[in-house]
């Protein structure tokens, strides 16, 4: 089985506007500024995602569009799934297991606390308390997506907009 890449990506920084339901929250200025910056970094990566699973929340879909631009994918490669809105780790894994078998690199864009919990679960230990907004945890595995389970993943790296700007 060929090596597979999993990109777990927390949505970019969002606004808290009084009266706007959580699901409809959009990106704030920082989120909109981090988007092109992180897309440029993603563009430089050797194994770009071919498929993007995203929460259906407005801020997650906006982030997924930046991710798609970074990986040079058309928006049709973003698959919006209600189950990723505030998904716990097992629900996110269920979504991942639905990835087509011919896809060897996939990104998932969703929310805390579930995404941080999934990073720690797949890493086999607590590696962080909080994946920051537009933070990316990159994993590799040789397992088929349909059989994805925690011990089969290796954490390759965690990157954040702030961390990349200080390099």
Image (cartoon, rainbow, N blue to C red):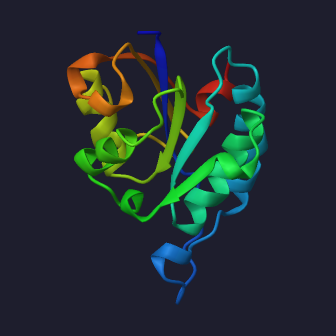
- Asked if one can make out residue 92 in the rendered structure from this viewpoint, the answer is yes
Quadrant hosting residue 36: top right
- Asked if one can make out residue 14 in the rendered structure from this viewpoint, the answer is no
The residue located at (69%, 54%) in the rendering is: 30
In the depicted view, which residue is nearer to us: 56 or 146?
146
Quadrant hosting residue 144: top left
Residue 19 vertical position relative to residue 99 in the rendered view, above or below: below
> Residue 161 in the image: x percent, y percent?
63, 35
> Residue 14 in the image: x percent, y percent?
58, 62
> Residue 103 in the image: x percent, y percent?
54, 28
Is 158 left or right of 141, judged from the image as shown? Answer: right
The residue located at (63%, 69%) in the rendering is: 26
Is 10 left or right of 166, judged from the image as shown? Answer: left
Count of number-bearing discs: 0
> Residue 24 in the image: x percent, y percent?
55, 76
The residue located at (46%, 52%) in the rendering is: 110
The residue located at (28%, 51%) in the rendering is: 91
In the depicted view, which residue is nearer to us: 96 or 64?
96
Which quadrant, please, contains the C terminus?
top right
Which quadrant, please, contains the N terminus?
top left
Give the farthest residue toward the bottom: 19
């Amino acid at each position: 089985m060929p090596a597979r890449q999993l990109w777990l990506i927390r949505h970019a920084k969002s606004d808290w506007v009084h009266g706007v339901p959580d699901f409809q929250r959009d990106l704030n200025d920082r989120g909109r500024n981090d988007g092109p910056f992180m897309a440029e970094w993603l563009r430089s990566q050797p194994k770009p995602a071919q498929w993007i699973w995203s929460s259906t929340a407005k801020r997650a879909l906006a982030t997924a569009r930046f991710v798609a631009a970074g990986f040079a994918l058309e928006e049709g490669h973003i698959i919006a799934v209600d189950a990723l809105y505030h998904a716990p780790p097992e629900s996110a894994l269920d979504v991942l297991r639905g990835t087509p078998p011919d896809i060897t690199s996939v990104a998932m864009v969703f929310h805390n606390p579930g995404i941080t919990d999934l990073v720690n679960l797949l890493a086999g230990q607590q590696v962080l308390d909080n994946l920051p907004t537009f933070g990316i945890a990159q994993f590799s595995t040789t397992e088929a997506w349909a059989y994805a389970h925690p011990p089969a993943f290796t954490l390759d790296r965690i990157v954040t907009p702030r961390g990349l700007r200080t390099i």
